[in-house]
């Protein structure tokens, strides 16, 4: 599934002029062509900040200045050959983005009569080892991928690792919006400012008074236009409070815009939403429309899950806020479901979203518009992100959605089969991992991506 999110990646490549006199006249051109092809391959899935092939300390200093002025999600070091590691070390001195070392050999099989000159041409592995040693000495985390330019399988792994590393890097300095404090007593969804700071993100909260004013100030014509759009795109009846639900969606979009937020959390079960005399509705439609725009939101004030949703959507293109409700011992499956909010990108078939009045969570002003749909069948990964006393932990499990049964639940739902065993046994391990009770469900088995994300963030991960 296409993610709709492209990372911004810096590329650093090096060569050594020491051997030029012994090499053929085309040697520099071959090295520069190798670096250019590396950039082109990365450009298939990322916006690449290209830098000149580094051939000297002065080149490295120039590249350092270039990269220091960029906001990068990740950096890829892809040597064209063996070269002094001081080149890359200097180039990356002022770059704090997470790093991938890409060893890209340019030959599939060595010739029978290999000469030292040609061996020097094909010395990307030596260059990678040299700089890898320096990175370990510096205590800098990095991932390594070996994939030649014509190795389709290896390049698929490279894309997954670089994207995952960049997704982690994209969190640096990110803002997450909060509209509503957590439900009182929900200790497992809380995250103090100091915990968010350890992850490199910050929170911007909207007061009750500010929020009520924002919703009340939305022009009715704009709200009516959004209702018309919803009716045109999705089936069902959005209910008598559709215009007010649309106003909440537009106000939330404006708040996200103003904060420059990557995502956020709402708590519909309190004075910002359901019990407010001025708002009086849940934000289900708002969550669906903003998540669809790539700004996922969690409910109940659960900011850690909002961050997990953001990671999931950038990794996989869809992110469902959900809970593991109950294991079904007869089949080994587990029901996963949301409560009227959800990411339309998860709908099966695509676009098959039903809107309806949320009679399960009425507010002071009525029943808000909510969404429901069956989940796309196929491989999936459940993610849970939580702060602990000694750092953050990313719990995760792969499996698959095998069916969706329950249209009367009035919300997105499906039956999940854990890869690690029957649902009751897997859920016991899930509980033991310290996962939050809200999760982010992403399409695909993210078995390469999750460890790369955790390593780039400098946090622990636990597979269930």
Image (cartoon, grey):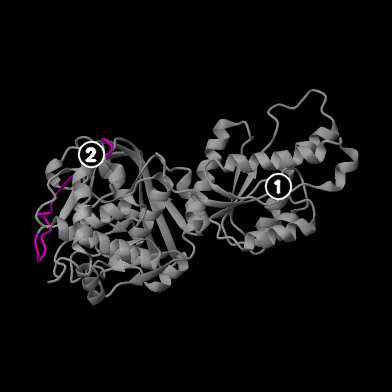
- Residue at (71, 26) in percent of width and height: 109
| 2 or 1: mark nearer the eye | 2
Against 129, residue 251 (above or below) is below
Residue bearing mark 1: 129
Left or right: 357 in relation to 158: left
Image disc number at residue 327: none
In the figure, residue 114 lies in which quadrant?
A: top right
Circles 2 and 1: CB atoms closer than 8 Å: no
Mark 1 residue crowding within 10 angstroms, few (<14) / some (14–19) / many (20+): some
Furthest-right residue in this view: 21
- Assess whether residue 9 is covered by the magenta stretch: no
Q: State the image coordinates of residue 22 (x, y, percent, origin top left).
A: 90, 39
Left or right: 11 in relation to 236: right
Q: State the image coordinates of residue 314 (x, y, percent, origin top left).
A: 42, 50
Q: Is residue 148 visible?
A: yes
Q: State the image coordinates of residue 282 (x, y, percent, origin top left).
A: 18, 61
95 or 68, nearer to the observer:
68
In the figure, residue 41 lies in which quadrant?
A: top right
Lower position in the chain sequence, tag 2 or tag 1:
1
Q: Is residue 283 visible?
A: no
**Judging from the image, what secondary structure is the residue with disc 1 in?**
helix
Alpha carbon separation for disc pair 2 and 1 = 50 Å
82 or 14, nearer to the observer:
14
Quadrant of the image for the N terminus?
top left
- Residue at (38, 53) in percent of width and height: 395
Q: Which residues are magenta?
A: 349-366
Against 149, residue 83 (above or below) is below
181 or 274, nearer to the observer:
274
Furthest-front residue in this view: 221
- Assess whether residue 365 is covered by the magenta stretch: yes
Residue bearing mark 2: 352
């Amino acid at each position: 599934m296409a993610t709709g999110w492209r990372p911004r990646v810096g590329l650093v490549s090096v060569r050594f002029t020491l051997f030029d006199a012994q090499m053929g006249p085309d040697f520099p051109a071959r090295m520069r062509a190798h670096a250019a092809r590396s950039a082109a391959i990365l450009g298939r899935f990322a916006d690449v900040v290209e830098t000149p092939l580094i051939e000297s300390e002065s080149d490295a200093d120039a590249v350092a200045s270039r990269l220091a002025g960029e906001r990068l999600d990740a950096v890829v070091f892809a040597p064209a050959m063996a070269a002094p590691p001081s080149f890359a070390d200097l180039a990356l001195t002022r770059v704090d983005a997470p790093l991938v070392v890409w060893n890209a050999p340019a030959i599939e099989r060595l010739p029978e009569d290999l000469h030292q000159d040609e061996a020097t041409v094909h010395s990307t592995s030596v260059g990678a080892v040299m700089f890898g040693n320096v990175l370990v000495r510096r205590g800098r985390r990095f991932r390594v991928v070996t994939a030649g330019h014509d190795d389709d399988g290896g390049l698929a792994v490279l894309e997954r690792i670089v994207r995952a590393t960049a997704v982690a890097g994209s969190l640096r300095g990110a803002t997450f919006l909060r509209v509503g404090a957590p439900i009182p007593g929900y200790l497992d969804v809380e995250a103090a400012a100091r915990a968010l700071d350890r992850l490199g993100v910050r929170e911007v909260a909207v007061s009750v008074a500010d929020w009520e004013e924002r919703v009340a100030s939305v022009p009715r014509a704009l709200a009516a236009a959004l209702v018309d759009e919803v009716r045109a795109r999705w089936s069902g009846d959005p209910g008598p409070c559709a215009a007010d639900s649309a106003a909440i969606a537009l106000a939330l979009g404006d708040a996200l815009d103003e904060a420059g937020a990557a995502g956020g959390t709402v708590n519909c079960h309190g004075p910002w939403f359901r019990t407010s005399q001025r708002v009086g509705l849940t934000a289900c439609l708002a969550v669906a429309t903003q998540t669809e725009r790539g700004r996922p939101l969690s409910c109940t004030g659960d900011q850690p899950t909002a961050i997990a949703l953001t990671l999931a959507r950038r990794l996989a293109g869809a992110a469902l806020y959900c809970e593991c409700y109950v294991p079904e011992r007869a089949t080994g499956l587990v029901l996963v479901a949301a409560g009227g909010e959800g990411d339309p990108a998860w709908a099966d078939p695509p676009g098959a979203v039903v809107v309806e009045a949320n009679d399960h969570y009425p507010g002071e002003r009525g029943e808000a518009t909510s969404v429901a749909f069956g989940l796309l069948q196929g491989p999936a990964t459940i993610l849970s992100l939580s702060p602990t006393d000694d750092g953050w932990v990313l719990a995760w499990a792969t499996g698959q959605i095998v069916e969706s049964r329950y249209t009367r639940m009035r919300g997105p739902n499906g039956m999940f089969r854990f890869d690690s065993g029957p649902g009751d046994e897997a859920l016991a391990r899930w509980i033991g991992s310290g996962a939050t009770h809200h999760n982010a469900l992403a399409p695909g088995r993210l078995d390469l991506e999750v460890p790369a994300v955790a390593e780039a963030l400098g946090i622990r991960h636990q597979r269930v």
